Image (tube, helix red, strand yellow):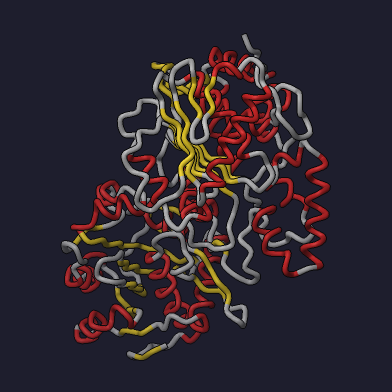
């Protein structure tokens, strides 16, 4: 029986958490989530160490076909992160049903030349030998050549391993296991022809180069009746932000941050914590290239490539994107707020007394089929603190659709009071306007000003003006928004932005991305963001009014900023 704490997978986890291995923060978060399971202290999941023993035995039968360790067994050649990935994926099971695996999906974000295709090939061979008979395995990639790379790697391992050569039949378009008749087929990418498959296991490779997430959705939809389904989504970074892999990564980050509950996802995200100082910070190379930590030749090669990228601008994008896992855009898009800095500002509903407070209201009324938000802010002069109460709205008739597309349980958000459904296929503007018109009555506040974006809220603003409120158009330009955007960040970092608990608001902050204009003014960019950010925008609009009010301490009349 394997000695648990001496196993390579456990050593990797422990070394990451002890700081002996320089790992990025989201890898650390995943290791933290797995520690109790590896130690046998989790109430629901355990590591099946008998299966680990079996896998180790199989790995000792597999031989490295090429590379630095050609001729050695794969058991001898695995890096720590590879062992951790394999054992966590295959051997994490339910405590009360060891035949049922925990993880349904694995996400691996890792730089080029870190053995990701090799790693998936090993997992496929292991599952070829462990899964029930007649299981189907598929790979999908942006083109047929990439999809067949996994098949090529599997073939090389089989041909190099005497114990395996007579266990498989290898054909031009598939590999068949003679032991259980399981079959692996590499598929060419298509936008319409990936349905009607029943994959027990699939991999979608180089997801960042795909035009949409159809391949992932088609494979996942075919697994509905599979007990121990597994899907592997792997890729390096790609220069464009708008790609399906970034959606998968952002979702995984929200899971690891505790914003979304998804026990079926395992993610190792090797993207560096520092995304700016790629020219000089060796930690970027170490965190994005875990194989380079155990193969020094790789690290030295990366440093040579880095020097070339510094000297030759045309080489820069490829190096920074593919070998540092940083989307290279020069002065460009970046995360707005780390939600870990946001959480300490959370207060319970009812903890802050709104009675008698002067408030500034911000509204972000988007298209009639999209999310809309209202926020009211109060400033406490004694503590120099801003208090925020947020209201979010979605079309009642689009709850199911938005839940699927955005991978967010809107029914639960509504149940918890984090947002409200109104209207049918379009939001009910009268309902939202009524919320604003009754803030004073319901909360005992005095509305100083109402800020709005002219594009979608002009009609509502006119109604507020007719009701006697001061309304201010806040133009959505960097020249106007950069000051409140900067102030909101400072308030959060200093613990001076207190918001009534709202998970949807936290998700909005996690989604928000910023750009800089030519004058280096920073602003939140809706198009660049990875999900809905209407609640963040409403806060910035309200802060814009509050900031000007504090600067001037005068009473404003209806006007435009």
Name the spot of residue 12 as percent of width and height, x first.
67, 30
Residue 137 in view here: yes
Query: Along the horizontal axis of the image, is 467 left or right of 288?
Result: left
Where residue 229 sits, quadrant-wise, is top left
421 or 484, nearer to the observer: 421
Name the spot of residue 260 as percent of width and height, x first.
41, 45
Where residue 4 sits, quadrant-wise, is top right
Q: In which quarter of the image is the C terminus?
A: bottom left
350 or 75, nearer to the observer: 75
Residue 10 in view here: no
Residue beneath the point at 26% across and 82% down: 461
52 or 314, nearer to the observer: 314
Residue farthest top in this picture: 1
Against 48, is 295 above or below?
below
Against 331, is 102 above or below?
above
Query: Along the horizontal axis of the image, is 26 left or right of 19?
Result: left
Query: Along the horizontal axis of the image, is 289 left or right of 446?
Result: right
Query: Along the horizontal axis of the image, is 139 left or right of 11?
Result: left
Q: How many marks?
A: 0
Against 118, is 533 above or below?
below
Residue farthest front in this picture: 172
Residue beneath the point at 31% across and 47% down: 409
Name the spot of residue 50 as percent of width and height, x first.
54, 12
Q: In which quarter of the image is the N terminus?
A: top right
Residue beneath the point at 33% across and 53% down: 405
Residue beneath the point at 34% across and 80% down: 449
Name the spot of residue 416 as percent of width and height, x first.
28, 48
């Amino acid at each position: 029986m394997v000695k648990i704490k001496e196993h390579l997978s456990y050593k990797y986890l422990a070394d990451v958490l002890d700081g002996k291995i320089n790992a990025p923060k989201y890898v650390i978060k995943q290791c933290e989530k797995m520690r109790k399971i590896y130690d046998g202290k989790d109430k629901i999941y355990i590591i099946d160490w008998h299966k680990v023993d079996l896998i180790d035995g199989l790995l000792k039968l597999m031989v490295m076909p090429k590379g630095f360790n050609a001729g050695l067994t794969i058991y001898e050649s695995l890096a720590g992160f590879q062992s951790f990935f394999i054992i966590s994926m295959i051997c994490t099971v339910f405590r009360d049903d060891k035949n049922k695996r925990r993880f349904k999906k694995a996400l691996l974000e890792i730089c080029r030349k870190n053995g990701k295709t090799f790693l998936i090939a090993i997992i496929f061979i292991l599952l070829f030998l462990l899964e029930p008979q007649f299981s189907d395995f598929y790979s999908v990639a942006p083109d047929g050549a990439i999809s067949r790379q996994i098949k090529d790697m599997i073939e090389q391992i089989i041909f190099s391993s005497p114990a395996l050569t007579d266990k498989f039949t290898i054909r031009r378009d598939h590999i068949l296991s003679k032991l259980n008749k399981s079959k692996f087929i590499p598929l060419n990418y298509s936008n319409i022809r990936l349905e009607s498959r029943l994959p027990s296991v699939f991999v979608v490779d180089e997801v960042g180069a795909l035009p949409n997430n159809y391949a992932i959705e088609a494979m996942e939809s075919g697994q509905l009746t599979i007990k121990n389904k597994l899907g592997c989504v792997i890729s390096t970074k790609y220069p464009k932000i708008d790609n399906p892999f970034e959606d998968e990564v952002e979702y995984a980050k929200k899971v690891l941050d505790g914003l979304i509950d998804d026990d079926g996802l395992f993610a190792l995200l090797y993207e560096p914590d520092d995304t700016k100082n790629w020219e000089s910070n060796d930690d970027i190379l170490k965190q994005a290239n875990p194989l380079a930590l155990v193969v020094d030749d790789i690290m030295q090669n990366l440093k040579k490539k880095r020097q070339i990228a510094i000297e030759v601008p045309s080489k820069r994008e490829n190096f920074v994107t593919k070998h540092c896992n940083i989307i290279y855009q020069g002065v460009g898009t970046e995360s707005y707020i780390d939600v870990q800095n946001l959480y300490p500002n959370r207060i319970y509903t009812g903890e802050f007394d709104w009675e008698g407070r002067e408030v500034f209201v911000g509204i972000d009324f988007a298209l009639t089929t999209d999310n809309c938000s209202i926020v009211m802010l109060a400033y406490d002069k004694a503590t120099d603190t801003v208090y925020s109460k947020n209201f979010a709205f979605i079309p009642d008739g689009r709850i199911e659709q938005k839940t699927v597309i955005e991978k967010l349980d809107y029914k639960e958000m509504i149940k918890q009071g984090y947002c409200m459904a109104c209207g049918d296929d379009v939001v009910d503007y009268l309902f939202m306007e009524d919320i604003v018109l009754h803030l004073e009555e319901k909360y005992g506040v005095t509305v100083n000003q109402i800020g709005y974006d002219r594009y979608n809220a002009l009609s509502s603003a006119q109604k507020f003006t007719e009701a006697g409120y001061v309304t201010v158009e806040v133009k959505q330009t960097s020249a106007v928004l950069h000051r409140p955007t900067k102030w909101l960040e400072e308030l959060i970092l200093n613990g001076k932005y207190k918001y009534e608990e709202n998970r949807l608001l936290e998700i909005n902050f996690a989604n928000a991305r910023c750009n800089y204009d030519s004058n280096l003014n920073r602003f939140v960019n809706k198009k660049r963001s990875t999900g809905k950010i209407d609640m963040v925008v409403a806060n910035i609009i309200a802060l814009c009014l509050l900031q000007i009010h504090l600067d001037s301490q005068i009473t404003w009349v209806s006007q435009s900023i």
